[in-house]
Image: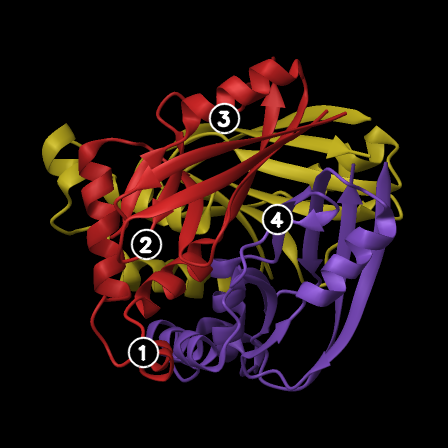
Chain colours: A yellow, B purple, C red
Amino acid sequence: MVHSSLLKLSTGGDGEIVDLTHGVASIVSASGARQGIVTIAAVGSTVAVTTMEYEPGGVRDLAGLLERLIPCEGEYAHNALNHDTNAHAHLRAALIGPSETLPITGGRPALGTWQQVVLLDFDDRPRSRTVHVHVVA
Amino acid sequence: MVHSSLLKLSTGGDGEIVDLTHGVASIVSASGARQGIVTIAAVGSTVAVTTMEYEPGGVRDLAGLLERLIPCEGEYAHNALNHDTNAHAHLRAALIGPSETLPITGGRPALGTWQQVVLLDFDDRPRSRTVHVHVVA
Amino acid sequence: MVHSSLLKLSTGGDGEIVDLTHGVASIVSASGARQGIVTIAAVGSTVAVTTMEYEPGGVRDLAGLLERLIPCEGEYAHNALNHDTNAHAHLRAALIGPSETLPITGGRPALGTWQQVVLLDFDDRPRSRTVHVHVVA
């Protein structure tokens, strides 16, 4: 059984982190699946999906870490060759990855109490984003 | 067909890396699946799953790399706001990600000879961990 | 329904990035699946799979970033203990991860216009690589 759905959202970009947990759990619930897996994938090359404890401190720390490791400003070939400004966004997205696949158990995504599914929009402008959520059971 | 199982383990935390390959292969074998996929996901926001050559040198190098990129000590908002000490663990786990999905071929996870599935427990204290292993075939 | 296939390729190693999108899309198309998921996994502990905009600037930036964060040259225990030279390749592969799972929608992998599935071969010599592509629908 495959149950395909999607989440649509608008972000401010610039590394905004959005909690997708409720949306994902609702789709899993609507699918009727009790055991299986769910793939959550953001469309685009400047956006990523992972899990984290979604609280203000961790959100600020992750932004700080990524700016330290992969700064917005830098000598990037992507920007030079394409007259663009978001090379850092591409690099951050490629490193973290566009998707996460989680087990479903008891009709819910198998997450810890302090663990949320998040989208990270690294682009340097507001974006409309599509997230595919596919349940296989 | 979905076959759901789990691994329970205790770790010392502090970046301990545990080889899950035998446990995952046993669950895949018990499922009877010859072709399919298997999702391996650790529960929690301070633990991650990936693959690596599980040998003492690589284990030491990975610990060293993560301490260099994301040190235990630092000015972390998570620690300041929550009176906590494991912000580095949250950041490392979010970067590497909580799960891995692997193909199953010939009744086994498709891994190289020198490639193991590992759990990395970044929390700064011993933990009991649950890893969900879901086979879809 | 599980449809299992694989891609075989030769790379020059040293961080070569190979666009797998066409090969993956062909396998998905041949499977006949309209909705589902596809797992793309490279075999080995010095190779990784992610998505990115596959253009010369971004390819160069990603190579530069990884050399800055995880240099080829360094005091690596893997190299010292195993008389080896590719510790950096192991670390880069473990960080990015060996696989990606993407939704299938309308008979195609759900990717953005500027988003490609890529293999990154970090080993320090030419390699023959196997990539398993498993469709579940």
Could you tell me the amino acid type at mark 2?
Answer: Phe
- Residue placed under numbered mark 1 in the picture: C83
Total marks placed: 4
Can you give x and y, in whole percent of width and height, for residue C51 in the image? 41, 37
Q: What is the spatial separation of the Cα atoms under label 4 and label 3, in whole angstroms? A: 17 Å
User: Taking B63 as reference, is C1 left or right?
Assistant: right
Q: What is the spatial separation of the Cα atoms under label 1 and label 2, in whole angstroms? A: 18 Å
Task: Say which chain tag 2 marks.
Answer: C
Q: What element carries label 1?
A: loop
Query: Which mark sits nearer the N-terminus, 1 or 3?
Result: 3
- Residue placed under numbered mark 2 in the picture: C122
> How busy is the neighbourhood of tag 2: few (under 14 within 10 Å), some, or many (20 plus)?
many
Q: Residue B110 carries which label?
A: 4
Task: Say which chain tag 3 marks.
Answer: C
Q: Between C28 and A14, which is closer to the camera in this rendering?
A: C28
User: Taking B115 as reference, is B6 left or right?
Assistant: right
**Which quarter of the image is occupied by the N terminus of chain B?**
top right
